[in-house]
Image (spheres, grey):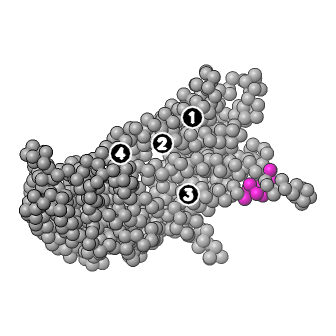
């Protein structure tokens, strides 16, 4: 397992560092709004595409403040990939301000959006879709297909390369999804309940049947009220939730308080909305899902 | 009886985080109440706001350097606040520039420096949330910090109380009889900074000023005497903390704003019905004096 991960990371690194020398001029300049989406685009685009991400590793795309440099990069891009579903609220103004003529590609096109929160939710922003669609690997495959089609439309000469890259990556995602289902199946059904700080795992819950509850809504912008926190503590006591998890993009103090008060163990950090930087163990999407899976399994199986 | 219990007491007996939030809010009110009254009496009501802005960058830089570390963020905030307070006092007392103008220049500079540093380093966790604090997530360390700050504030105020009151009432007289006015004023500004730093852990830099100034304004409508004013201010700050947490618990409103809004409601009542200069009292002076 470890060696495979290393091999994957090495390949990704190689693709990053070796390729630029090849044909820097005719590479397609594209923008992805956040790190996970950027990883998808890199995988499909391969060495024909130069990807820049606006919100970097460990960054929070819900409340990002773009810089003039970002506007310039958007203006120079041939394609702008966004998640959509209300994830990057600041992006629309950035695109307008930059005056770019690049087409905006919504990578979640065709994904059936979940109502935010679901049955366990706390209705801060009613009726809005949950944007965290990448947390289900099945959805990630739709992202990849959308990216592939958009790249082919923008750069027809690279059609064969994009088709081949996408097919290879989709195969990896298939293997990943099999692993996710396998691991979740090992967790006893009555222990598949965890707490996180903001509702980023609705799609994971929907696809794989692990139930997530969070004091903050789907966006980290909403502030938790005493009522929400009390409801979660009551739920943990009643249902015996096994573990609470922190996230790499949000303030951990509230979840730590909940853990202290209920005696639930802090299971570790889940990666929700962003990849980690080079020091972390999830610099690519596949590692992100595998990391979350390991964290869940080690906290819930025993 | 059991219903009253369920509404007013049970939230706190049942949940530890509510008890912690209440303890934090009460300690904040204890220190912020008297300071707010003095700020108001010295016509410095907006100084708290300016100081909060001066502190914010310091706390942000502390956060960027060492993450969500209570000590680093507190130290950063204190340093930024002290530097601005000292420079302001220095400029106001040695040049033609008045204190408000000096403060305005320095807090804006502090803010600009902070924002520049943040934008250079880029942010990890959503900084705004860190800076907004959360009264529902007070851990032992933070609670202790708030309590220690409140204690220091009360002791220090007891020491500088006389010069402070005299300087409020008659600064000219103060200068002729004593040279304690300057140091007392400086100590007072330092206390304001300490309490704002406490406040930002619980309520965030923006609302921390609210728990200072609103209770003071409430006290102003009920008492002419400074001591009584301070007591009323502190009590109404405590009531706002308690009631705000209850509102947040029962109606699902974010707790920081709820506390300040309750204080605002108390202020409106005082504005209308206050014994000292309340609007109703001004409109019908005779009838109320008879009663």
Give the residues in magenta.
B269-277
Spatial CA span between label 1 and label 4: 27 Å
Q: Earlier in the sequence, mark 1 or mark 3?
A: 1
Q: Mark 2 points at which residue?
A: B56
The numbered disc on residue B104 is 1
| Residue B148 vertical position relative to residue A262 in the rendered view, above or below | above
Q: Which of marks 2 and 1 is nearer the N terminus?
A: 2
Q: Which of marks 2 and 1 is in front?
A: 1
* Closest to the observer, A164 or B13: A164
- Left or right, A243 with reference to B52: left
Q: Say which element carries label 2.
A: helix
Q: Nearer the viewer, mark 1 or mark 3?
A: 1
Q: Nearer the viewer, mark 3 or mark 4?
A: 4
Q: Mark 4 points at which residue?
A: A67
* Closest to the observer, B235 or A84: A84
Counting from the top left corner in percent of width and height, residue A245 is at: 33, 62
Marked residue chain, label 4: A
């Amino acid at each position: 397992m470890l060696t495979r991960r290393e091999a994957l990371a090495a390949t990704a690194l190689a693709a990053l560092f070796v390729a630029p020398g090849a044909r820097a001029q005719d590479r397609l300049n594209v923008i992805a709004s956040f790190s996970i989406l950027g990883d998808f685009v890199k995988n499909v685009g391969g060495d024909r595409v130069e990807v820049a991400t606006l919100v970097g590793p460990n960054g929070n795309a819900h409340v990002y403040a773009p810089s003039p440099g970002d506007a310039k990069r958007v203006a120079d891009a041939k394609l702008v990939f966004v998640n959509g579903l209300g994830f990057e609220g600041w992006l629309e103004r950035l695109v307008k301000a930059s005056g770019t003529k690049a087409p905006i590609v919504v990578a979640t096109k065709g994904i059936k959006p979940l109502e935010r929160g679901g049955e366990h939710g706390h209705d801060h922003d009613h009726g809005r879709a949950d944007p965290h669609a990448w947390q289900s690997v099945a959805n990630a495959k739709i992202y990849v297909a959308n990216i592939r089609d958009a790249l082919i439309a923008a750069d027809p000469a690279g059609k064969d390369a994009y088709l081949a890259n996408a097919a290879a990556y989709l195969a990896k995602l298939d293997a990943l999804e099999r692993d996710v289902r396998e691991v979740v199946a090992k967790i006893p059904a009555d222990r598949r309940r965890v707490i996180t700080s903001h509702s980023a795992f609705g799609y994971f819950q929907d696809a794989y049947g692990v139930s997530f509850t969070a004091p903050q809504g789907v966006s980290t912008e909403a502030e938790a009220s005493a009522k929400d926190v009390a409801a979660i503590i009551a739920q943990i006591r009643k249902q015996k939730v096994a573990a609470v998890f922190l996230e790499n993009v949000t303030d951990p103090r509230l979840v730590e308080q909940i853990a202290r008060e209920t005696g639930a163990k802090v299971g570790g950090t889940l990666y929700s909305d962003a990849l980690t930087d080079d020091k972390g163990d999830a610099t690519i999407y596949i590692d992100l899902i595998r990391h979350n899976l390991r964290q869940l399994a080690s906290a819930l199986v025993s | 009886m059991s219903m009253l219990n369920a509404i007013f007491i049970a939230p706190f007996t049942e949940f530890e985080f509510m008890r912690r939030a209440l303890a934090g809010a009460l300690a904040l009110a204890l220190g912020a109440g008297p300071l707010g009254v003095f700020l108001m009496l010295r016509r410095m009501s907006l100084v708290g706001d300016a100081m909060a802005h001066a502190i914010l960058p310091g706390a942000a830089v502390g956060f960027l350097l060492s993450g969500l570390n209570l000590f680093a963020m507190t130290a950063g905030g204190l340093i930024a606040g002290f530097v601005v307070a000292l420079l302001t006092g220095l400029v106001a007392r040695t040049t033609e520039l008045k204190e408000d103008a000096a403060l305005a220049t320095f807090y804006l500079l502090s803010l600009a420096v902070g924002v520049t540093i943040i934008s250079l380093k880029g942010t990890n966790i959503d900084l705004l949330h860190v800076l907004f604090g959360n009264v529902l997530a007070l851990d032992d360390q933070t609670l202790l910090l708030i309590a220690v700050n409140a204690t220091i504030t009360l002791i220090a105020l007891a020491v500088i109380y006389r010069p402070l009151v005299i300087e409020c009432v008659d600064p000219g007289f103060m200068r002729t009889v004593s040279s304690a006015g300057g140091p007392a004023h400086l100590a007072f500004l330092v206390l304001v900074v300490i309490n704002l730093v406490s406040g930002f852990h619980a309520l965030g830099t923006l609302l921390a000023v609210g728990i200072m100034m609103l209770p003071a304004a409430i006290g102003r409508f009920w008492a002419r005497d400074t001591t009584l004013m301070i007591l009323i201010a502190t009590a109404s700050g405590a009531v706002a903390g308690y009631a705000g947490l209850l509102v947040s618990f029962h109606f699902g409103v974010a707790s920081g704003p709820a506390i300040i809004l309750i204080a605002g409601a108390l202020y409106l009542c005082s504005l209308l019905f206050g014994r000292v200069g309340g609007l109703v009292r001004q409109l019908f002076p005779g009838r109320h004096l008879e009663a």
